[in-house]
Amino acid sequence: MNIPTEENDYLAAHAALLGTSYRRLLNRDLLPGHCGTKEFGRALFEAPFAVVSHGTEEDPVFNYGNRKALELFEISWEAFTQTPSRYSAEPVNREERQRLLDQVGRHGFIDHYRGIRISKNGRRFLISNAVVWNLYDERNVYRGQAACFGEWEFLP
């Protein structure tokens, strides 16, 4: 998958999957005022909060990160979309991260998640009030999981 740009309509289909799954599970819009519009893909990529998603592989790989997420994780789109999502957490925190994803798998979503993440360059940051949700397409087929968060604090 190429980086979201005007030429590929900001990956409108994937952005729509993120937005419709969020609305279906949380009964609110991921990006109020933009959901369901032609501009949604661009607005999501340029949003002031981080949005990421991974697929359904046995060791899920990131398949989307908006500009804010790429900045926080200090990584290019090309590298991010080849990275197993478990690498977003330090090894010591991966078991806790997996418990979170298992809980989301069972319940559809969680909100108010708090945890430590790590950038490609080793910079640690605490995310707060994150929402993590399952992705389902229009036929209700499971397509992975996504997360968004607008609160983070860099750690020493």
Image: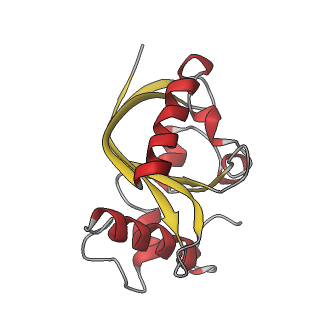
Q: Does any portion of residue 67 appear in the rendered image?
A: yes
Residue 82 percent location from the top left of the image = 74, 48
| Front position in the image: 124 or 131 | 131
| Picture quarter with the C terminus | top left
Could you say where residue 151 lies in the image, as x and y percent from the top left? 30, 39
In percent of the image, x 70 and y 66: which residue is there?
Answer: 2
Q: Is residue 150 visible?
A: no
Name of the residue lying farthest toward the bottom = 38
- Does residue 89 appear to the left or right of 114 in the view shown? right
Does residue 62 appear to the left or right of 32 in the view shown?
Answer: right
Give the residue furthest to the top. 156
Left-right relation of 148 to 83:
left
Looking at the image, residue 85 lies above or below residue 16: above
Q: Quadrant of the N terminus?
A: bottom right
Seen at 58% across and 65% down, the residue is: 142
| Residue at 49% in and 47% down | 69
Q: Is residue 42 above or below residue 69?
A: below
